[in-house]
Image (cartoon, coloured by chain):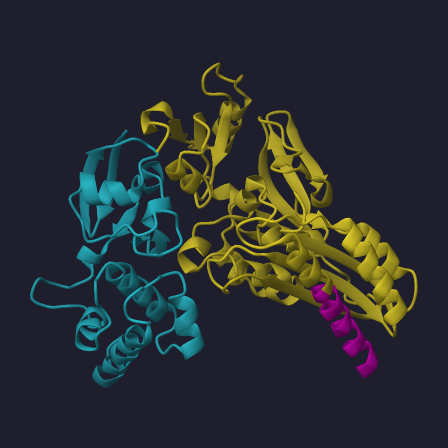
């Protein structure tokens, strides 16, 4: 099928099988390798992206279900090439990323969490990130990073 | 992947009548009948694993008329495409049918809850699914629709064997109906849900126990037990329910209920647990559920 969708604000078109995984469409057909493949079965969250503003596992979304939809990947998170999103910045500064495979999905899950809970409790944070597995950090530095992003948001008075 | 993607046919339905027309088409010699595809959280896993049957799939995700929660004086109707996230966030469901929100919260994690649907969870027919026990505890009804019209099936009779269900290939599950209880009903209610697994998120249950009870004094006026992962189907335990309704709730009655429940379930050994463990845990959960009924009756 000819698939047309919006990715990170730009309309893109490609020719794919209707049941191709959104993950493969992004990485292979649209040359956006920022989205990672971990388990490929919806358990690990490495392939998380936003579809119409909702966090999803792109390995479980068939191409035909994103026709005409709005997709945001990790490549679309930073406002510009010079400037990082505050969650990205916090992950860099507080050691939230080690090997980096879980990081794109983790950052998107963290953004989904902060959109719903701007000042998450520990329980809300654990639940919001429960679908994203990290085998390096032990999660402590990831939680630290998210809390640092919250603190920065509060300090600067920005949403 | 053991099947090539190119062997599969799939298209999005643009309307409910179109979806029903496709489902009503005779089975293709090579690819069988059209089968519905909803949020994809189960189907895409089996596609990647190479275990999804080669076939024709009609994507019903665009059909907004199958989404949403409608409340009337008598009932709550949940559209088949309603996601776990929608269920979790609905205030009336949380108040009157809390087991559903608890089940939705323990299904996968946020990204799965945003895509997984109630109808899909039912049609996938896994005996380990998290919402079916809650639906059994509330004695839900399913509405199925085909070109010949709607049909209502009590959910407790929907699953007939492992992955077997009372759905014709031309039918689509369109809604789940829950009867609301009048506010002047006697006694008080106990809603109990517990999923036992390796962790709260993502893990598939070893045992899932959902129960609804109406209690007055030391007697159960009504009780419904819905269990997951202890039989080939999501299991309503009506024999145990009958025992529990037969006399005031005391230790001898609990023992009889345990013995009956042990007889009603048929758990197996598999990658997630063993039969003896599941049996022991199921009886422990029955006891925990009944202790909540007793606590409440002692305090009134």
- Which residue is painted at 60% across and 59% down in the image? B100
Seen as rendered, the residue at the extreme top is B29
Q: Is residue B261 magenta?
A: no
Residue nearest the observer in this picture, B271 or B70: B271
- Which residue is painted at 27% across and 60% down in the image? A102
Q: Quadrant of the N terminus of chain B?
A: top left
Q: Position of residue B216 (x, y in %)?
A: 86, 71
Residue nearest the observer in this picture, B290 or B260: B260
- Residue range corresponding to the magenta coloring: B284-300
Q: Position of residue B250 (x, y in %)?
A: 88, 72
Query: Left of A12 or right of it: where is B174?
Result: right
Using the rendered image of the protein, determine whether residue B20 is visible from the camera's viewpoint. yes
Q: Position of residue B289 (x, y in %)?
A: 73, 68
Task: Give the prevailing secondary structure in the magenta stretch.
Answer: helix
In the rendered image of this protein, which colour is used for chain A? cyan
Query: Left of A23 or right of it: where is B127?
Result: right
Using the rendered image of the protein, determine whether residue B76 is visible from the camera's viewpoint. no
Q: Quadrant of the C terminus of chain B?
A: bottom right
The yellow chain is B
Q: Position of residue A43 (x, y in %)?
A: 40, 54
User: Image quarter for residue B273?
Assistant: bottom right
């Amino acid at each position: 099928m000819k698939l047309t969708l919006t990715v990170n604000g730009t309309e893109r078109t490609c020719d794919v099988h209707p049941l191709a995984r959104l993950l493969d469409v992004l990485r292979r057909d649209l040359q956006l390798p920022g989205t990672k493949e971990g388990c490929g079965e919806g358990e690990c969250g490495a392939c998380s992206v936003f579809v119409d503003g909702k966090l999803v596992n792109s390995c479980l979304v068939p191409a035909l279900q994103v026709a005409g939809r709005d997709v945001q990947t990790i490549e679309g998170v930073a406002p510009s090439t010079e400037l990082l999103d505050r969650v990205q910045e916090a992950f860099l500064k507080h050691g939230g990323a080690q090997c980096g495979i879980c990081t794109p999905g983790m950052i998107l899950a963290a953004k989904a969490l902060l959109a719903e809970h701007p000042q998450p409790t520990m329980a809300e944070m654990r639940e919001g990130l429960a679908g994203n597995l990290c085998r390096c950090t032990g999660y402590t530095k990831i939680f630290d990073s998210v809390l640092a992003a919250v603190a920065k948001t509060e300090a600067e008075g920005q949403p | 992947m053991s099947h090539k993607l190119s062997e599969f046919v799939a298209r999005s339905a643009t309307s409910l009548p179109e979806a029903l027309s496709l489902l009503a088409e005779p089975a293709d010699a090579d690819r069988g009948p059209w089968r519905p595809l909803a949020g994809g959280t189960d189907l895409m896993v089996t596609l990647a694993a190479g275990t999804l049957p080669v076939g024709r799939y009609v994507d019903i995700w665009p059909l907004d008329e199958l989404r949403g929660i409608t409340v009337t004086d008598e009932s709550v109707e949940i559209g088949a495409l309603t996601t776990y996230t929608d269920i979790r966030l609905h205030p009336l469901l949380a108040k009157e049918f809390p087991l559903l929100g608890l089940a939705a919260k323990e299904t996968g994690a946020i990204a799965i809850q945003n895509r997984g649907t109630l109808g899909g969870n039912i049609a996938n027919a896994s005996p380990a699914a998290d919402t079916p026990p809650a639906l059994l505890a509330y004695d839900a009804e399913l509405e199925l629709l085909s070109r010949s019209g709607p049909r209502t099936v009590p959910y407790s009779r929907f699953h007939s064997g492992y992955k077997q269900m009372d759905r014709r290939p031309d039918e689509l599950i369109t809604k789940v109906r829950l009867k609301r209880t009048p506010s002047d009903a006697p006694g008080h209610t106990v809603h109990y849900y517990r999923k036992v697994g390796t962790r709260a998120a993502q893990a598939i249950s070893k045992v899932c126990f959902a129960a609804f009870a109406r209690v007055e004094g030391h007697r159960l006026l009504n009780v419904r037990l819905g269990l997951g992962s202890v039989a080939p189907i999501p299991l309503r335990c009506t024999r145990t329910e009958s025992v529990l309704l037969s006399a005031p709730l005391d230790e001898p009655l609990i023992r009889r209920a345990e013995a009956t429940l042990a007889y009603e379930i048929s758990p197996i050994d598999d990658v997630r647990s063993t039969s003896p463990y599941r049996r022991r845990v199921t009886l422990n959960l029955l006891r925990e559920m009944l202790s909540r009924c007793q606590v409440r009756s002692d305090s009134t």
